[in-house]
Amino acid sequence: MRLSEKFQVCGIPSLVVLTSSCDVLTMDGVEEVQSVSDEALQLWSQGKCVFWTRPPSEGEHVWEGITCTLCHMYPLVGTRRGCTHQGCNINLCDACISNNKHEHPLAEYLIPKKHYSLEQIFASVPHLLGPNNEEQIETRTLWKDDVKSIGIYFSADSCPPGRDITSTLAQYYTEAQASRHPFQLVFVSADEDETSFNKCRARMPWPAVPFNAGALFELYFERRGIPSLVIVSADGNILTRRGQRYVSNKGVDALKAWAQGENLPPLSADDFEWWGIYCDGCNVSPLVGQRYYCSTCGNYDLCSACEKKGHDHPLELIPQPKDDEH
């Protein structure tokens, strides 16, 4: 038997550390060296691992793939706090927060799929920035005055499709604001730097979450691509993750319906966008319309037009997810 088979190595580089009796000390040698450098060698020589964890208590979340920066709990269990500034890769567990000496304030991560109120969702946002200026607006203005739902718009200056959708959305937003059913929107940046962030939000007549304050939103809403418009009701429920597609189909009527807290009828199968999925036949990305999957090929999808051309193996029609699902 090859060593890679014995230790079930699935990729390289991989470093398996053994004890003097040839028991496995850790399968995560590469990650442990990356985490603490030469300290890992010292710990291994003492028969100790760098990473450790504990079983979660009832209701505690396990943050797969996340390590506590100070105590190296991996995966991190329970409350997770981190820095939203780009370039600051720091995560702390609840026990280590009292030893925090990081230069920026830390925010508590929201657990994906867990329900939160709008106030809880925006708790890490100190204020909003006014449209195309530096005016600081109280965050709670988003949900005051009996607001039924709000839109959270993810985009970036480097995204050409985002510019087109932003222009269309701005037109409908302005129209809705002048009607009896104004709609609240807020921009969350996916830009790499603040200059790009300011260029992007300059095209928008709605407020923005400050640069370096929106990272938690991407994780909580499980954003898979940009541009993306997520509609959240006043009580924190996700009405749809595909708002941009509804805007393309329904125009200003979509915004007016959301302003009244209404759900729109599901998108037809022909209009549905599969974010993160492309057609292996014609390379359209994202795949739009009905999606056919080949389990024999693995990670192989076809749109309805390419499915009609035939395939060597049986294809499975993938059901369309609900609006609050991916």
Image (tube, grey):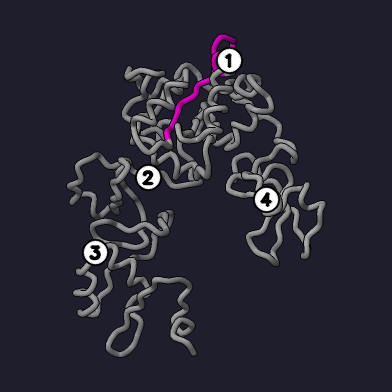
- For marks 2 and 4 on the same chain, the one whose residue lies earlier in the sequence: 2
Query: SS at mark 1?
Result: helix
**Is residue 282 rendered to the left or right of residue 276?**
right
Seen at 59% across and 44% down, the residue is 275
Q: CA distance from mark 1 to mark 3?
A: 53 Å
| Residue 56 colored in magenta in the image | no
Which residue has dot 1 on it?
A: 176
Give the amino acid at mark 4.
Cys
Seen at 59% across and 40% down, the residue is 324
- For marks 4 and 1 on the same chain, the one whose residue lies earlier in the sequence: 1
Instruction: Please provide percent x and percent y for residue 202.
Output: 42, 21
| Number of dots carrying numbers | 4
Q: CA distance from mark 2 to mark 4?
A: 34 Å
Which residue has dot 2 on it?
A: 109
Query: SS at mark 3?
Result: helix
Which of the two discs, 3 and 2, sits closer to the camera?
A: 3
* Residue 229 seen: no
Which residue has dot 3 on it?
A: 36
Which of the two discs, 2 and 4, sits closer to the camera?
A: 4
Which of the two discs, 4 and 1, sits closer to the camera?
A: 4
Q: CA distance from mark 2 to mark 1?
A: 33 Å
Query: What is the magenta range?
Result: 173-189
Give the amino acid at mark 3.
Val
Give the amino acid at mark 1.
Ala
* Image: 300 above or below 157: below
Which residue has dot 4 on it?
A: 279
Q: Are marks 2 and 4 in contact (CB under 8 Å)?
A: no
Q: Residues within 10 Å of mark 4 (few under 14, many from 20)?
A: many
